[in-house]
Amino acid sequence: AVLIFGQDAAAVRLRQQPEIEDDEGADSECPESSQCPELLSEEIHLPALKAPTAAMPLAMHRYRGMGHKHNHTGEREVEPANVSLPHFASPEMFVAVFSAMFKESRRHAARWAWHGAKRIAVKFIVCKDPPDEVAINESKQYHDIVFLDCEEGYKEGKLTQKLARTMRYFRDAYPKTPFFFKTDDDTFVRSRDLLSLVKDANSSWIYGGLFYSGHSKPNRDPGSKWYQPLESYPEKDYPVHCAGGPGYVLSKALVQEILNKSLPERYLLMNEDKAVGVWVKKVEETGVNVTKVKVKGTDGYRLNECMTFPYTPWSQYDFVLHHHVEPQALVCMGRNWRPRDLLVQCFDCGAPRALLGA
């Protein structure tokens, strides 16, 4: 099936990805007003990674943009996808892509970016409140959205409650799947390499992702959406934790232990990724040795892709997690690229044609 950009959305034929048997082969500001994680994770030496293998059913041409229609968030819209998120029958990892009712453009881009991924089951996670007819109809068409009994938002620990409900969904719906991965709908993920990293750790207790460097302190400003009341978390610093936007992996045993000990109820922090760090630390305090798997990537805050990747070919692009990617760039990054093609083609950099090899 070929999707022709510009055609009427109603005419797009959905090719829903069926159950496949395993084969052999948010916001522009930083999560904390006083600090950001390092733009790039600390230097981690990984084997050279190949260009993305998630193929889009599109002829491979130079990236020239896809029009200039914008949605209400200011992002350029993309055409509706004609594929659903991948969902293997016996997945090695469940991927929870956090989204919201009004982010349909991001979801269409994510469907393209995740298309072709192997040995995983991917679902968009959306709260039922507030209800939205567009998202409900979208779910009926693509069958890749899970609506949970939660409320979207940041204040009052709403995002953390959404995560806790997602973890329970994973525990109940995927009892034999060894890994849980939470990420955002604007993150580009090399799922094959991520899965290899956590499997190579060879541990039943795994916590992996893009770890924040240095000490992270609670935000005590009542006017901030990341406000952390002193009474619910009196500590001066947060424990080591992964950035929530790019995503983090938790092993099945760790998820079960967190839920069995009711840690989400006992430690309901306002910031979801900080909460996970606290929950993991509480598990460690019981004598469990949790293996930390450092994954190379970027949180995307203040990152200028045009300056960072001006001459970087896909063969040298070694991020496993790349957060804050605009929908059109996410679609572009999900294509099958030749190793020598330049990454900068996917971003609106105004690069000269000579630089792009056109």
Image (spheres, rainbow, N blue to C red):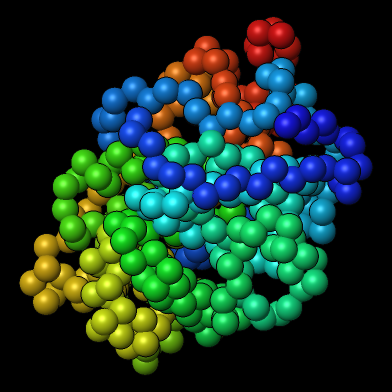
Residue 164 is drawn in which quadrant? bottom left
Q: In this orientation, which residue lies closer to the viewer: 73 or 150? A: 150
The residue depicted at 50 percent of the width and 15 percent of the height is 339
Q: Is residue 197 above or below residue 4?
A: below
- Outermost residue, bottom side: 231
Residue 54 is drawn in which quadrant? top right
Q: Is residue 232 above or below residue 73?
A: below
Q: Quadrant of the N terminus?
A: top right
Does residue 353 appear to the left or right of 269 in the view shown?
right
User: Residue 72, position in %: x, y?
Assistant: 82, 59
Q: Is residue 101 above or below residue 343?
A: below
The residue depicted at 77 percent of the width and 73 percent of the height is 132
Q: Quadrant of the C terminus?
A: top right
Does residue 295 appear to the left or right of 224 in the view shown?
left
User: Residue 351, position in %: x, y?
Assistant: 70, 20
The residue depicted at 38 percent of the width and 36 percent of the height is 23
User: Residue 220, position in %: x, y?
Assistant: 45, 80
User: Residue 160, position in %: x, y?
Assistant: 46, 76
